[in-house]
Image: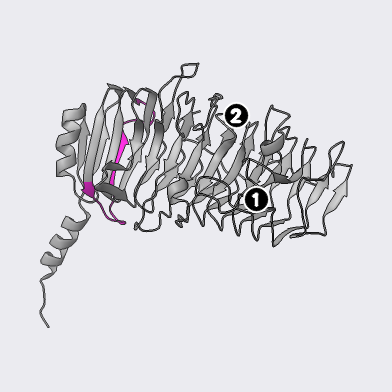
């Protein structure tokens, strides 16, 4: 057996664990550092205002030794105007940056171009905010665009968006790996009413890719006054999980708009009577809505606490697929204007009622509202074992199981 002297082993170990820091003060210095970094290295952005800074890096770290782009002091590197960071490669981490009053298309983009995407990256402890009131006329711009696979977006603060386009978008493509992203422990703050479609806070997929399995997890996030449009979250893909999130005074719903086989579990929707505050809207097949808490929601029609939509016969991808095999179980409805609505129509040709669907084991406090509002045939809906009362139980918690959200430096 070939043997190496001990000092050779020490040399190999030292080389594999060494790391270099690259302090940078401008875009040119960042570009130079981006060409040099190796696994385990760190690019440190010096504190200050970076105006119209277009930062790009295409490099590969490893799971054990990622490449990190970090603010010298979290929240003290402020990128303004047409600033953007674009990542391609693998195992890159962006930490502590603040994009303030962005004017470009995407502040954070997990690709450089359609041929240079990122995988296995993390955006953490960052913020994208807009301070200016009033809706701007820009079309389809985002704060965060996610391409590729297995990214994590966590402990970020996204608020104040006043342009068209979703705040955060997961983009899918035929033939790609599972997206399998995790979006967790973020704060999604105030968003003004846009007055048209395209004001989602999160969108996963689109109608063209809605039958692809994305397998994303959205958990432990706080959504507060995200009023852009009726779809606060727009699910447009298959196999996603939405759990342990809290929605506070949101004029909109978590909408299973396209795609199948998603789970909505243990979320809390606190309306506090806010105008248009809603819960969950169901369209498509094999969805599970379980263990959620709907409290003092004032929304009507599609913004009801829980709404089953009618399907369109031979529906096109962008229309409304029939609700099939939905399971709604173990949810709590307290003091909502409209509790469970079955058969809402969002299309002039919609006529297909839910089938093979069960509504079981839910608690509904009625007050003046009906427990169920039936607007279609319900032969295909099993309604069993639900409790209906005019009294609000004292032992039902009103707080979400949500851990602290947003950047550690924000407050």
Q: Position of residue 394 (x, y in %)?
A: 84, 43
Residue 225: which numbered mark, if any? 2
Q: Position of residue 156 (x, y in %)?
A: 45, 36
Residue 402: which numbered mark, if any? none
* Secondary structure found at label 1: loop
Height in image: 86 above or below 207? Answer: above
State the residue lying farthest toward the bottom. Answer: 1
Provide the residue span drawn in magenta.
59-77
Height in image: 53 above or below 347? Answer: above
* Residue 411 in magenta stretch: no
- Count the numbered circles shown: 2
Asked if residue 67 lies left or right of residue 292, the reply is: left
Please give the name of the residue rendered at 47% of the width and 33% of the height, measured from the top-left corner: 157
* Residue 73 in magenta stretch: yes
**Among the 4 quarters of the image, the one containing residue 338:** top right
Residue 266: which numbered mark, if any? 1
- Camera-nearest residue between 356 and 154: 356
């Amino acid at each position: 057996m070939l043997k190496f002297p001990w000092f050779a082993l020490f040399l190999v170990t030292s080389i594999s664990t060494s790391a270099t820091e690259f302090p940078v003060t401008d875009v040119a210095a960042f570009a130079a550092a981006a060409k040099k970094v190796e696994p385990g290295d760190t690019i440190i952005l010096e504190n200050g205002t970076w105006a119209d800074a277009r930062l790009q890096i295409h490099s590969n770290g490893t799971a054990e030794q990622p490449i990190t782009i970090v603010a010298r002091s979290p929240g003290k590197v402020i990128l303004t105007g047409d600033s953007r960071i674009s990542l391609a490669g693998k195992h890159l981490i962006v930490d502590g940056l603040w994009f303030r009053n962005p004017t470009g298309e995407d502040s954070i983009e997990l690709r450089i171009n359609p041929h240079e995407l990122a995988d296995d990256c993390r955006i953490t402890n960052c913020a994208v905010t807009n301070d200016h009131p009033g809706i701007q006329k820009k079309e389809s711009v985002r704060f965060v665009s996610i391409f590729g696979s297995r990214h994590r977006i966590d402990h970020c603060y996204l608020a104040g968006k006043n342009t068209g386009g979703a705040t955060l978008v997961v983009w899918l493509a035929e033939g790609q790996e599972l997206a399998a992203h995790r979006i967790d422990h973020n704060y999604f703050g105030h968003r003004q009413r846009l007055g048209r479609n395209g004001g989602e806070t999160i969108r996963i997929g689109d109608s063209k890719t809605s039958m692809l399995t994305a397998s994303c997890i959205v958990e432990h996030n706080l959504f507060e006054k995200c009023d852009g449009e009726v779809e606060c979250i727009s699910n447009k893909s298959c196999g996603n999980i939405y759990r342990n999130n809290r929605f506070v005074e949101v004029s909109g719903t978590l909408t299973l708009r396209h795609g199948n086989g998603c789970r909505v579990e243990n979320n809390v929707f606190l309306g506090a009577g806010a105008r248009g505050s809603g819960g969950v809207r169901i369209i498509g097949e094999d969805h599970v809505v379980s263990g959620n808490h709907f409290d003092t929601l004032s929304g009507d029609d599609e913004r009801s606490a829980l709404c089953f939509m009618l399907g369109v016969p031979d529906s096109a991808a962008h229309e409304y697929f029939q609700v099939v095999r939905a399971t709604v179980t173990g949810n709590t409805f307290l003091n909502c204007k409209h509790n469970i609505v079955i058969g809402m129509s969002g299309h002039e040709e919609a006529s297909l009622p839910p089938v093979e669907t069960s509504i079981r084991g839910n608690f509904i406090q009625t007050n003046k509202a009906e427990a169920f509002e039936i607007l279609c045939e319900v032969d295909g809906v099993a309604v069993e074992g639900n409790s209906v009362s005019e009294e609000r139980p004292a032992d039902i918690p009103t707080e979400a199981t949500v851990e602290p959200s947003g950047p550690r430096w924000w407050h």
